Image: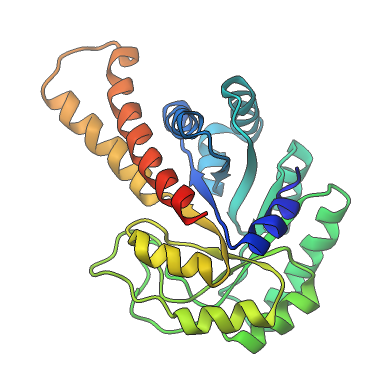
Amino acid sequence: MKLQDKFIALRSKKQAVLATNFYNFETLKGVLLAAKAMEQPLILQLTKSSIDYMGLPVAYQMARSMLNYHGVEGWIHLDHGDSYDLVAQCLDAGFDSVMIDASERPFSENVAITAKVVKLAESYGANVEAELGYIAKLGQDKEKGGFTHPLEAKEFVEATGVNALAVAIGTAHGFYDREPELQLDRLSEIAAATSAALVLHGGSGVPGSSLRKAVDRGICKINLATEIKNIFMGALKVKLLTNEEIDLRKVFPVATDEIVELVKEKLDIVRNLN
């Protein structure tokens, strides 16, 4: 099933799917072992930084072969693509879905580049995600305003034909200093104004009760990245401080196991939301 068709089904049932970033073989293995154990679908996400680190063909083929090997229903998605050229490269490689993030540009420019990407993706049968509003990235001010406006969301989706839209309703990338207060009424208004699948970025640290309310009001995709990196590196640091083993094949599994448990917990939350 194409991801855009999955989103249509999810939205009609007020359900959601978890989207997890991966950064190397160990993090990829961890999220897929969790999905297999929970018998849940999963979106595997790659950012430009991860693609640059692993190499596009390597990262894509590793993800595709691991999905098949573990028998997990899943899709490969470009997260926060920052250029038309990168999107085109990912589509040529075989990605099921791409995100073009021009949210920091003026509205008209965001519309123009997103519409261009949507037109390109049509020939590949791929899903396209965009972002509208201000969702603080790592290192950016989390207190800055810039919520997605329902009427702008309607105009944006109609002008671009985008399949999925990441909306600014109070979340941010990275960890929170305090529990985020989601603008749920605003989310309901956005969902009523547009038929696009709505995406929640900054899912790390959002309580399950808040996620439940967000899915009830239209969120179809929940992103998870920061917690994956954090738990992997934290487990490695502890292991390396108490162990003189030089065989990385004996050291890395400790951190991978931590990712498995983390993602199983998140998938259990999402499953209970569905």
* Front in this rendered view, residue 93 or 126: 126
Q: Is residue 236 left or right of residue 157?
A: left
Whether 46 is drawn above or below 256: the answer is: below
Residue drawn where x is 78% and y is 78% of the image: 158
Residue drawn where x is 51% and y is 29% of the image: 36
Whether 112 is drawn above or below 95: the answer is: below
* Front in this rendered view, residue 254 or 119: 254
User: What is the residue that sits farthest to the bottom in this orientation?
Assistant: 151
* Front in this rendered view, residue 154 or 235: 154
Q: Is residue 107 left or right of residue 149?
A: right
Q: Is residue 59 left or right of residue 250?
A: right
Residue drawn where x is 34% and y is 48% of the image: 227
Give the number of callouts.
0
Q: Position of residue 98 (x, y in %)?
A: 68, 52
User: What is the residue that sits farthest to the left in this orientation?
Assistant: 242
Q: Position of residue 79 (x, y in %)?
A: 57, 52
Q: Position of residue 240 (x, y in %)?
A: 18, 24
* Quadrant holding the N terminus: top right
Q: Position of residue 41 (x, y in %)?
A: 58, 40
Q: How is the image coloured?
A: rainbow
Q: Quadrant of residue 75?
A: top right
